[in-house]
Image (cartoon, grey):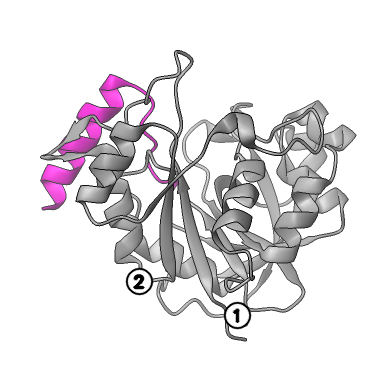
C-alpha cells in the first residue's frame, strides 16, 4: 500500500495570545526550529508548519521550513467542541493546502518536542499499512507510578506479533482495544501509556472532525474514545518512551542539557 504523507506541525499561542515557548533558544536555535528539524530527519513525506504568529513563521522560514498562516477566527465550526489535539485546525489547514487530495495521510506532530526521535515517526507508518486502519498513534511502557496517575491516559492493546517494524527492533504493531484513566475499565491485561501523536487517513480525519464528541469522550476527557466509539480502527506502534514535551522553563533547561549530552 503506497501512502503519501503530509506532516503538519501546528504552532500555538498562550493564554495571552503570544507565542508560547517556540522562540526560546535551545542550544543556538529556536525550540520550534529544533522540533521541525527532528521531524525532517524522519525523511517521511512533506512538512508544513501552521503558524499564527508572524515572528514564529519568520524564524521557521529562515530555517527552510514551509509555513502557512492560520487565523483561528476563520476555522470552520462543526460543533461547539474542540479537541485537545486541534484536529479541527489540522483538517482545515490540510484542506486549504491540499484541495485535490494529493496527500492521503496526515501526521500531526507537536511543536514542543525538540528531542523527538525521528525513528518514532517512521515507526508510526508501519501502523497504517493495513487498509482497514483509519488512524494510528503511539504507546510506550508505563514507568514508575504512572499506572496510578490519572493525568496519564492508559491503553489496552491487541498485539499483532507478525507485523514487523523494521526501523525499531524493540517496536511492534497492535490494535487499540480501549483508552481510559481508570484501571478498572481497562481490565486485567498489560497496559501502556498513550503518546498523543496521531496519523490520520484523510477520510478518517474528516469523519472524526465532523462527528460530535461522544459521552465517553466527555466523561474521561480522552478524544481518542470518539474514534473507537465511531468504529474507526486505530492501530499503534510501540516506542521506547514518551517524547519529552516542553511545558516550563525548567523543561527548557532539561532539553538543553539532554541535547548537549547527545551531541
Dot 1 falls on a residue whose secondary structure is loop
Mark 1 vs mark 2, foreground winner is: 2
User: Mark 1 packing: few (<14 Cα in 10 Å), some, or many (20+)?
Assistant: some
Residue 36 visible at all: yes
Which residue appears at 32% of the width and 47% of the height? 35
User: Mark 2 packing: few (<14 Cα in 10 Å), some, or many (20+)?
Assistant: few
Image quadrant where one finds the N terminus: bottom right
From the viewer's perspective, tell me whether residue 262 is left or right of residue 134.
left
Which residue appears at 10% of the width and 53% of the height? 263
User: Pointers 1 and 2 in contact (CB under 8 A)?
Assistant: no
Residue 191 % position (x, y): 65, 48
Start and end of the magenta stretch? 241-263
* Residue 17 sits above or below residue 69 on the image: above
| Residue marked by disc 1 | 163
Which residue appears at 87% of the width and 53% of the height? 230
User: Is-magenta flag for residue 260?
Assistant: yes
Disc assigned to residue 46: none
Dot 2 falls on a residue whose secondary structure is loop
Rounded to the nearest angstrom, the CA distance separating label 1 from label 2 is: 22 Å
Residue 210 % position (x, y): 81, 47
Q: Earlier in the sequence, mark 1 or mark 2?
A: 2
Residue 115 visible at all: no
The total number of labels drawn is 2
Disc assigned to residue 43: 2
Foreground: 210 or 256?
210
Q: Specify the quadrant of the image occupied by residue 66.
A: bottom left
Amino acid at each position: 500500500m503506497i501512502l503519501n504523507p503530509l506532516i503538519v506541525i501546528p504552532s500555538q499561542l498562550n493564554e495571552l495570545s503570544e507565542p508560547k515557548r517556540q522562540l526560546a533558544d535551545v542550544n543556538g536555535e529556536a525550540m520550534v526550529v529544533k522540533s521541525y528539524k527532528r521531524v525532517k530527519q524522519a525523511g517521511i513525506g512533506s512538512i508544513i508548519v501552521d503558524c499564527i504568529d508572524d515572528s514564529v513563521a519568520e524564524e521557521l522560514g529562515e530555517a527552510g521550513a514551509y509555513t502557512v498562516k492560520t487565523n483561528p477566527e476563520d476555522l470552520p465550526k462543526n460543533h461547539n467542541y474542540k479537541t485537545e489535539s486541534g484536529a479541527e485546525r489540522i483538517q482545515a489547514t490540510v484542506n486549504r493546502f491540499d484541495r485535490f487530495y494529493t496527500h492521503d495521510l496526515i501526521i500531526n506532530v507537536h511543536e514542543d518536542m525538540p528531542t523527538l526521535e525521528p525513528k518514532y515517526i517512521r515507526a508510526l507508518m508501519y501502523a497504517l499499512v493495513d487498509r482497514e486502519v483509519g488512524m494510528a498513534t503511539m504507546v510506550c511502557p508505563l514507568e514508575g507510578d504512572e499506572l496510578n496517575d490519572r493525568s496519564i491516559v492508559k491503553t489496552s492493546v491487541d498485539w499483532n506479533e507478525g507485523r514487523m517494524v523494521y526501523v525499531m527492533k524493540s517496536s511492534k504493531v497492535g490494535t487499540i482495544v480501549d483508552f481510559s484513566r481508570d484501571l478498572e475499565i481497562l481490565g486485567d491485561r498489560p497496559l501502556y501509556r498513550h503518546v498523543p501523536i496521531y496519523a490520520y487517513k484523510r477520510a478518517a480525519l474528516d469523519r472524526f472532525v465532523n462527528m460530535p464528541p461522544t459521552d465517553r469522550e466527555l466523561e474521561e476527557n480522552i478524544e481518542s474514545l470518539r474514534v473507537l466509539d465511531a468504529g474507526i480502527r486505530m492501530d499503534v506502534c510501540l516506542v521506547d518512551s514518551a517524547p519529552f514535551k516542553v511545558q516550563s522553563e525548567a523543561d527548557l533547561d532539561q532539553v538543553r542539557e539532554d541535547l548537549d549530552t547527545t551531541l
